[in-house]
Image (tube, helix red, strand yellow):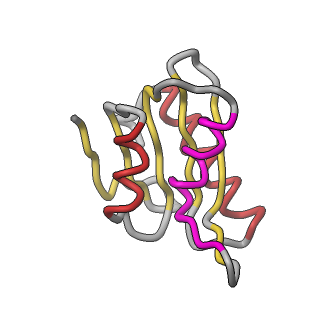
Amino acid sequence: MADLSAEDRKLFTLARGAMGRAGAAQGAAVRDVDGRTYAAASVALPSLRLTALQAAVALAVASAATGLEAAVLVGGALDDESLAAAADLDTPLVLHLAPGGAVLGRRTR
């Protein structure tokens, strides 16, 4: 995690916390263009399935975010659905991290 900025480490902490609280396979956190952060865990209900990143993006949009500066996904796999949700808000950086903090992937636009 040494190569992450302080703000991206904060997103990691928020994402890992959301994952732990929910006992979920994934956690995610995003930072909007105004500096506000949103964190969520993956959702697996009979009638609704969201990746953690989709859920975090939905929270940001529901709070009137118009764009994202960065997104962090902890655990699970960084799939096309998650990347598409981040792309909908022109997210320039998506980090995929292991629960221990190791960088598994980095997507930039």
**Residue lying at the far top of the rendered structure:** 34
Image quadrant where residue 63 sits:
top right
Q: Nearer the viewer, residue 14 or 4?
A: 14
Q: Main secondary structure of the magenta part?
A: helix
User: In the rendered picture of this protein, how many numbered marks are placed on residues?
Assistant: 0
Residue drawn at x 59%, y 34% is: 10
**Image quarter in which the N terminus is found:** top left
Q: Nearer the viewer, residue 1 or 91?
A: 91
Residue 11 higher or lower than 26, as above or below: above
Residue drawn at x 57%, y 65% is: 50
**Residue lying at the far left of the rendered structure:** 109
User: Residue 7's spot in the image, x, y percent?
Assistant: 52, 26
User: Residue 43's spot in the image, x, y percent?
Assistant: 65, 69
Residue 91 higher or lower than 102, as above or below: above
Indicate left or right for 49 with 47 as reference: left
Is residue 55 shown in magenta? yes
Indicate left or right for 18 with 73 as reference: right
User: Residue 93's spot in the image, x, y percent?
Assistant: 33, 35
Residue 22 higher or lower than 45, as above or below: above
User: Residue 107's spot in the image, x, y percent?
Assistant: 26, 45
**Image quarter in which the C terminus is found:** top left
Residue bounds of the magenta highlight: 48-62
Indicate left or right for 24 with 1 as reference: right
**Residue lying at the far bottom of the rendered structure:** 46
Image quadrant where residue 102 sits:
bottom left
Residue drawn at x 52%, y 54% is: 54
Is residue 28 shown in magenta? no
